[in-house]
Image: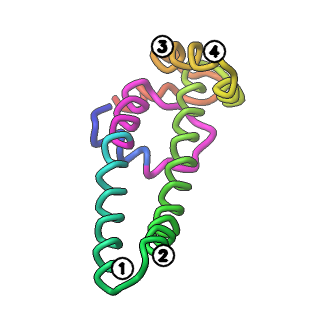
Amino acid sequence: MNFTDAVKAYFLKWNDFRSRSSRSEYWWATLFVTLASFPVGFIIGFVIGILFLTAGFSETTMEIVVGIVMLPIQIFIIIASTCLVIRRLHDVDKSGWWYLIIFTIIGIIPLLIWYCSKGTDGENRFGKDPLEQLQ
Protein backbone atom coordinates (compact mmCIF):
# COMPACT_ATOMS: atom_id res chain seq x y z
CA MET A 1 0.00 0.00 0.00
CA ASN A 2 1.38 3.40 -0.91
CA PHE A 3 1.21 6.64 1.07
CA THR A 4 -1.92 8.00 -0.65
CA ASP A 5 -3.87 4.75 -0.26
CA ALA A 6 -2.89 4.51 3.41
CA VAL A 7 -4.07 8.06 4.13
CA LYS A 8 -7.36 7.39 2.31
CA ALA A 9 -7.83 4.18 4.31
CA TYR A 10 -7.08 6.06 7.54
CA PHE A 11 -9.97 8.44 6.89
CA LEU A 12 -12.36 5.92 5.33
CA LYS A 13 -11.85 3.26 8.03
CA TRP A 14 -11.69 5.71 10.94
CA ASN A 15 -14.26 3.68 12.93
CA ASP A 16 -13.41 0.15 11.75
CA PHE A 17 -12.39 -1.94 14.76
CA ARG A 18 -12.91 -5.29 13.03
CA SER A 19 -10.69 -5.71 9.97
CA ARG A 20 -6.93 -5.78 9.40
CA SER A 21 -4.27 -3.23 8.40
CA SER A 22 -0.96 -4.06 6.78
CA ARG A 23 2.37 -2.75 8.03
CA SER A 24 2.57 -0.26 5.18
CA GLU A 25 -0.93 1.07 5.86
CA TYR A 26 -0.10 1.47 9.55
CA TRP A 27 3.27 3.17 9.10
CA TRP A 28 2.23 5.47 6.22
CA ALA A 29 -0.89 6.61 8.11
CA THR A 30 1.12 7.12 11.30
CA LEU A 31 3.67 9.19 9.38
CA PHE A 32 0.88 11.30 7.86
CA VAL A 33 -0.81 11.98 11.22
CA THR A 34 2.52 12.80 12.84
CA LEU A 35 3.60 15.20 10.09
CA ALA A 36 0.19 16.80 9.48
CA SER A 37 -0.79 17.41 13.11
CA PHE A 38 1.70 20.19 13.80
CA PRO A 39 1.05 22.36 10.72
CA VAL A 40 -2.74 21.98 10.99
CA GLY A 41 -2.69 22.94 14.67
CA PHE A 42 -0.31 25.81 13.97
CA ILE A 43 -2.45 27.21 11.14
CA ILE A 44 -5.67 26.97 13.15
CA GLY A 45 -4.03 28.60 16.16
CA PHE A 46 -2.42 31.29 14.03
CA VAL A 47 -5.61 32.22 12.18
CA ILE A 48 -7.74 32.30 15.31
CA GLY A 49 -4.99 34.18 17.14
CA ILE A 50 -4.79 36.89 14.48
CA LEU A 51 -8.58 37.23 14.30
CA PHE A 52 -9.08 37.42 18.05
CA LEU A 53 -6.11 39.58 18.98
CA THR A 54 -6.83 42.14 16.25
CA ALA A 55 -10.45 42.26 17.43
CA GLY A 56 -9.26 43.10 20.94
CA PHE A 57 -10.05 39.82 22.71
CA SER A 58 -7.79 38.56 25.48
CA GLU A 59 -5.24 35.80 25.04
CA THR A 60 -7.22 33.61 27.41
CA THR A 61 -10.34 33.88 25.25
CA MET A 62 -8.28 33.09 22.17
CA GLU A 63 -6.75 30.00 23.83
CA ILE A 64 -10.19 28.74 24.85
CA VAL A 65 -11.52 29.13 21.30
CA VAL A 66 -8.47 27.35 19.84
CA GLY A 67 -9.06 24.51 22.31
CA ILE A 68 -12.73 24.28 21.37
CA VAL A 69 -11.91 24.24 17.64
CA MET A 70 -9.13 21.66 18.07
CA LEU A 71 -11.10 19.31 20.36
CA PRO A 72 -13.17 17.58 17.64
CA ILE A 73 -10.05 17.19 15.48
CA GLN A 74 -8.15 15.63 18.37
CA ILE A 75 -11.04 13.31 19.25
CA PHE A 76 -11.21 12.17 15.61
CA ILE A 77 -7.45 11.50 15.54
CA ILE A 78 -7.62 9.51 18.79
CA ILE A 79 -10.49 7.34 17.52
CA ALA A 80 -9.04 6.84 14.03
CA SER A 81 -5.56 6.07 15.37
CA THR A 82 -6.92 3.63 17.95
CA CYS A 83 -8.83 1.85 15.18
CA LEU A 84 -5.67 1.74 13.07
CA VAL A 85 -3.66 0.20 15.93
CA ILE A 86 -6.36 -2.39 16.62
CA ARG A 87 -6.52 -3.32 12.92
CA ARG A 88 -2.71 -3.64 12.91
CA LEU A 89 -2.88 -5.96 15.92
CA HIS A 90 -5.55 -7.99 14.12
CA ASP A 91 -3.17 -8.42 11.18
CA VAL A 92 -0.67 -10.19 13.46
CA ASP A 93 -3.57 -12.24 14.88
CA LYS A 94 -3.73 -10.43 18.22
CA SER A 95 -6.85 -9.15 19.90
CA GLY A 96 -7.33 -5.39 19.98
CA TRP A 97 -7.43 -5.63 23.77
CA TRP A 98 -3.64 -6.06 23.68
CA TYR A 99 -3.46 -2.33 22.97
CA LEU A 100 -4.20 -1.73 26.66
CA ILE A 101 -0.67 -2.85 27.57
CA ILE A 102 0.45 0.58 26.37
CA PHE A 103 -0.51 1.76 29.87
CA THR A 104 2.16 -0.41 31.49
CA ILE A 105 5.79 0.57 31.83
CA ILE A 106 7.17 -1.84 29.22
CA GLY A 107 4.00 -2.27 27.14
CA ILE A 108 5.36 -0.32 24.20
CA ILE A 109 8.00 -3.00 23.53
CA PRO A 110 5.69 -5.84 22.44
CA LEU A 111 3.46 -3.35 20.65
CA LEU A 112 6.38 -2.03 18.59
CA ILE A 113 7.40 -5.58 17.76
CA TRP A 114 3.86 -6.39 16.59
CA TYR A 115 3.60 -3.13 14.61
CA CYS A 116 6.79 -4.10 12.75
CA SER A 117 5.96 -7.79 12.32
CA LYS A 118 4.67 -9.29 9.10
CA GLY A 119 0.96 -10.00 9.26
CA THR A 120 -0.60 -13.43 9.15
CA ASP A 121 -0.51 -14.90 5.64
CA GLY A 122 -3.98 -15.44 4.27
CA GLU A 123 -7.18 -15.13 6.22
CA ASN A 124 -7.17 -15.17 10.01
CA ARG A 125 -9.94 -14.82 12.61
CA PHE A 126 -10.10 -11.06 11.94
CA GLY A 127 -10.62 -11.24 8.21
CA LYS A 128 -8.87 -11.43 4.88
CA ASP A 129 -5.20 -10.62 4.37
CA PRO A 130 -4.99 -6.89 3.52
CA LEU A 131 -2.11 -7.58 1.14
CA GLU A 132 -4.23 -10.01 -0.90
CA GLN A 133 -6.96 -7.39 -1.20
CA LEU A 134 -4.51 -4.98 -2.87
CA GLN A 135 -3.69 -7.35 -5.71
Q: Say which quadrant the N terminus sits in.
A: top left
- Name the residue carrying label 4: 106
SS at circle 3: loop
Q: Between residue 86 and residue 33, name the one nearer to us.
A: 33
> Spatial distance from mark 3 to mark 1, Cα to Cα?
48 Å
The answer to whether mark 2 and mark 4 are in CB contact below 8 A is no
Against 113, residue 101 (above or below) is: below
Q: Nearer the viewer, residue 71 or 12?
A: 71
Q: Earlier in the sequence, mark 2 or mark 3?
A: 2
Q: Residue at x 28, y 33 (%)?
A: 2
Q: Nearer the viewer, residue 41 or 29?
A: 41
Alpha-carbon span between mark 2 and mark 4: 40 Å
Q: Residues within 10 Å of mark 3 (few under 14, many from 20)?
A: some
Q: Residues within 10 Å of mark 4 (few under 14, many from 20)?
A: few
| Pointer 2 local density, CA inside 10 Å: few below 14, some 14–19, many at least 20 | few
Q: Residue visible at 55% across and 24% down?
A: 91
> Which stretch is magenta?
11-33
Query: Mark 2 or mark 4: which is in front?
Result: 2
Q: Is residue 96 left or right of residue 121?
A: right
Measure the alpha-carbon separation of dots 1 and 2: 8 Å
Looking at marks 1 and 2 on the same chain, the residue that comes earlier in the sequence is marked by 1
The residue under label 1 is which amino acid type? Phe
Q: Are marks 1 and 2 in contact (CB under 8 Å)?
A: yes
Q: Position of residue 5 (x, y in %)?
A: 32, 41
Q: Is residue 56 placed above or below 100 in the rendered structure?
A: below
In the structure shown, which secondary structural element does the residue marked by tag 4 occupy?
A: loop
Mark 1 surroundings within 10 Å by alpha-carbon count, few (fewer than 14), some (14 through 19), many (20 or more): some
**Residue carrying label 2:** 61
For label 1, the residue is 52
Mark closest to the chain's N terminus, 2 or 4: 2
x, y percentage for residue 33? 38, 43
